[in-house]
Amino acid sequence: MTDTRDRKSRSLFGLVGDIPKLVKSLVKGEIDLLKAEMIAKAKVFGLAAGLLVGALVIVLYAIGVLLTAAVMGLATVMPAWLAALLLAVVMLIVAGILGFVGWKRFKKGLPLTPKRTIDSVKDDINAVKGLGNKPGQHDRIPRS
């Protein structure tokens, strides 16, 4: 880094020469922000998809248990079918809870657009034009 004395004595050509490096740094930072935001959204959707798949698997098993209960109920009039029916109801309740939680997680990740990155790029464009807020006023992910 240059200290303050070097900055004061730099010529206009030196400052203009720094523009490509600064633009490259800005673009790299925006790409890093986009990556971080999209990874966070992918994690939310991954967890939601896992919960929804779990709910689907449990529903499929519950259908098998319900069919077993129906067969046992028709084949004989014994309490065994009642146990199978009770198990199926419990499995459906668990599937409903997993499905509800998965759906809430899925909705939490919407919309898919990287809003913070878009806002940041708009701020950068406005700063270059000399309009609007100063860059960095939005909550950004720290750049490394």
Image (tube, rainbow, N blue to C red):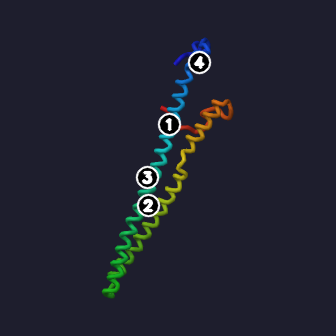
Q: CA distance from mark 3 to mark 1?
A: 22 Å
Q: CA distance from mark 4 to mark 2?
A: 55 Å
Q: Which mark is residue 15?
A: 4
Tell me which corner region of the image, top left, top right, bottom left or bottom right, holds residue 128: top right
* Image-based side of 71 in relation to 16, left or right: left
Mark toward the viewer: 3 or 4: 4
User: What's under tag 2, amino acid-wise?
Assistant: Leu
Q: Which residue is mark 1?
A: 31
Tell me which corner region of the image, top left, top right, bottom left or bottom right, holds residue 88: bottom left
Disc with the residue nearer the chain's start (2 vs 3): 3
Disc with the residue nearer the chain's start (2 vs 1): 1
Looking at this view, is 106 or 124 the one in front?
124
**Relative to 115, does residue 31 appear above or below in the rendering?**
above
Looking at the rendered structure, the secondary structure element under dot 4 is: helix
Looking at the rendered structure, the secondary structure element under dot 1 is: helix
Tell me which corner region of the image, top left, top right, bottom left or bottom right, holds residue 69: bottom left
Q: CA distance from mark 3 to mark 4?
A: 46 Å
Looking at this view, is 7 or 139 the one in front?
7
Mark toward the viewer: 3 or 1: 1
Q: Which residue is mark 3?
A: 46
Q: CA distance from mark 4 to mark 1?
A: 24 Å
Q: Which residue is mark 2?
A: 52
User: What's under tag 3, amino acid-wise?
Assistant: Gly
Disc with the residue nearer the chain's start (4 vs 2): 4
